[in-house]
Image: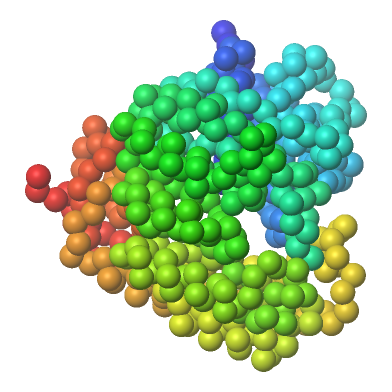
């Protein structure tokens, strides 16, 4: 009987892409993927370290893996494993710690892993990391496929630990990406999500140099690909060429995630962000004018050292004035090794909590307004692999990143369907299958 493996993934879409890649590699080595509750022989926990709260989630996931796997092996990888391997290894139940630069070695490391009271730590210097070639896709029950085209980051934002966890920016060759994307579509994926730490920097390190716009121009021609969805993109990367294809191609999903972090230029400068509030506003207004019913998301940090009430008010005013469909709001979290961790002017925790509450309330109101604008419309949705837990209905994802639950047969899962949006609730959007 083949060995079994389960995966727990925390954090960003890039981590999800990495987990899918690890799953493909291990399955080609004879492993069979099962749920964590099946008490597998190996559990791989792919961690995040972007905030202190993320690390708490990492710890809970690792403890749960150790509890449920019993006699299995617990492997911890990802960004927290890369930046704090000793801390990870000190947790009870961990058998192997694998850094981001060492993930490709996981099958061989597992083959040589023996039961020991001392966890094995395999964490190389991320500075010398390469981006691994793409493994051939395997049959998957997932409706959407994540495709990592870039890793690492060239920026040094004052608050961000990601360059320490992921290394320098590096890209895959466009021909390899296109071939893999075609294989994913042939395997039944109507949507591909392009991921990267610094996706807009794609191709700048290649010889000959290329760009994200050039890559998209190749990918949108793939027959059978309905949606090509982009992960986070900084405002400065929206060149004329990129704007043309993002706003002009029907294959590019009408959904963009453009990190904001703050609406105050004073705070943006302190964060070392490569844009101003005015630049951000101008880009979003241009995108919203060109893309009907644009799904627009952003990250916002509250309580950055030195953030005043006036700075926060500028953030609120900017958010209120722009057509966001959702926000990810984070209280500032000091990360070891970052510039901001040494900055004076710490904001009291209670103040940061209150600012976060206000922004989340504003985000909820804007999300409700966005969804209300979809009421009565018939939308093409990609039906996800899992039904809604509370209702048992199918779940469809629109191009502009709105989930709609609706009754329907299992045969629609992982396929495209036309759904009419019928009801907008506080935490859900309901629909019904549209007549053909």
- Residue ID at (48%, 25%): 179
Residue ranking furthest to the bottom = 310
Residue ranking furthest to the left = 435
- Residue ID at (39%, 49%): 252
From this viewpoint, is residue 425 visible?
A: no
From this viewpoint, is residue 333 visible?
A: yes
- Residue ID at (67%, 86%): 311
Q: Is residue 334 above or below residue 362?
A: above
Q: Nearer the viewer, residue 6 or 367?
A: 367
> Which color scheme does this rendered protein use?
rainbow
The quadrant of the picture occupied by the N terminus is top right
Q: Position of residue 276 (x, y in %)?
A: 63, 75
Q: Nearer the viewer, residue 180 or 329?
A: 180
Q: Nearer the viewer, residue 32 or 433?
A: 433
- Direction from residue 173 to residue 362 in the image, left or right: left
Q: Is residue 162 above or below residue 356?
A: above
Q: Position of residue 352 (x, y in %)?
A: 69, 79
Q: Is residue 354 above or below residue 16?
A: below
Q: Position of residue 184 (x, y in %)?
A: 43, 28
Q: Nearer the viewer, residue 350 or 230?
A: 230
- Direction from residue 194 to residue 271 in the image, left or right: right
- Direction from residue 135 to residue 265 in the image, left or right: right
- Direction from residue 268 to residue 112 in the image, left or right: right
Q: Quadrant of residue 195?
A: top right
């Amino acid at each position: 009987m083949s060995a079994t493996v389960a995966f727990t993934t925390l954090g960003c879409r890039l981590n999800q892409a990495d987990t899918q890649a690890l799953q493909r590699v291990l399955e080609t080595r004879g492993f069979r993927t099962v749920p964590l509750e099946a008490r597998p022989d190996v559990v791989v926990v792919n961690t995040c370290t972007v905030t202190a709260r993320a690390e708490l989630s990492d710890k809970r996931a690792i403890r749960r893996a150790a509890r449920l796997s019993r006699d299995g092996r617990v492997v911890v990888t990802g960004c927290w494993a890369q930046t704090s391997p000793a801390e990870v290894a000190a947790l009870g139940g961990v058998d192997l710690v694998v850094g981001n630069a060492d993930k490709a070695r996981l099958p061989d490391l597992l083959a040589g892993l023996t039961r020991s009271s001392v966890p094995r730590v395999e964490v190389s210097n991320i500075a010398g990391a390469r981006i691994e070639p793409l493994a051939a896709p395997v049959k998957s029950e997932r409706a959407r496929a994540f495709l990592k085209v870039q890793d690492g980051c060239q920026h040094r934002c004052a608050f961000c630990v990601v360059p320490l966890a992921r290394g320098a920016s590096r890209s895959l060759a466009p021909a390899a990406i296109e071939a893999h994307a075609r294989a994913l579509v042939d395997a039944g994926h109507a949507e591909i999500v392009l991921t990267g730490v610094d996706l807009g920097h794609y191709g700048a390190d290649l010889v000959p140099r290329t760009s994200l716009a050039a890559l998209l121009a190749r990918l949108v021609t793939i027959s059978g690909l309905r949606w090509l969805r982009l992960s986070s993109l900084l405002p400065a990367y929206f060149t004329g060429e990129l704007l043309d294809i993002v706003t002009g191609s029907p294959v590019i999903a009408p959904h963009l995630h453009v990190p904001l972090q703050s609406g105050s230029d004073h705070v943006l400068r302190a964060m070392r962000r490569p844009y101003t509030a005015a630049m951000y506003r101008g880009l979003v207004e241009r995108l919203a004018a060109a893309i009907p019913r644009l799904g627009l998301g952003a990250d916002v940090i509250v309580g950055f050292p030195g953030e005043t009430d006036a700075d926060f008010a500028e953030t609120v005013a900017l958010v209120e004035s722009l057509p966001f469909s959702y926000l990810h709001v984070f209280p500032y979290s000091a990360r070891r090794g970052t510039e901001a961790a040494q900055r004076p002017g710490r904001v009291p925790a209670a103040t940061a909590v209150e600012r976060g509450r206000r922004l989340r309330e504003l985000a909820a109101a804007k999300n409700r307004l966005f969804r209300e604008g979809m009421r009565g419309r018939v939308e093409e949705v990609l039906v996800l692999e899992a039904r809604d837990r509370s209702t048992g209905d199918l779940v469809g994802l629109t191009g502009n990143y709105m989930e709609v639950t609706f009754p329907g047969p299992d045969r629609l899962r992982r396929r495209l369907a036309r759904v009419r949006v019928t009801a907008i609730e506080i935490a859900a959007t309901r629909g019904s299958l549209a007549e053909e």
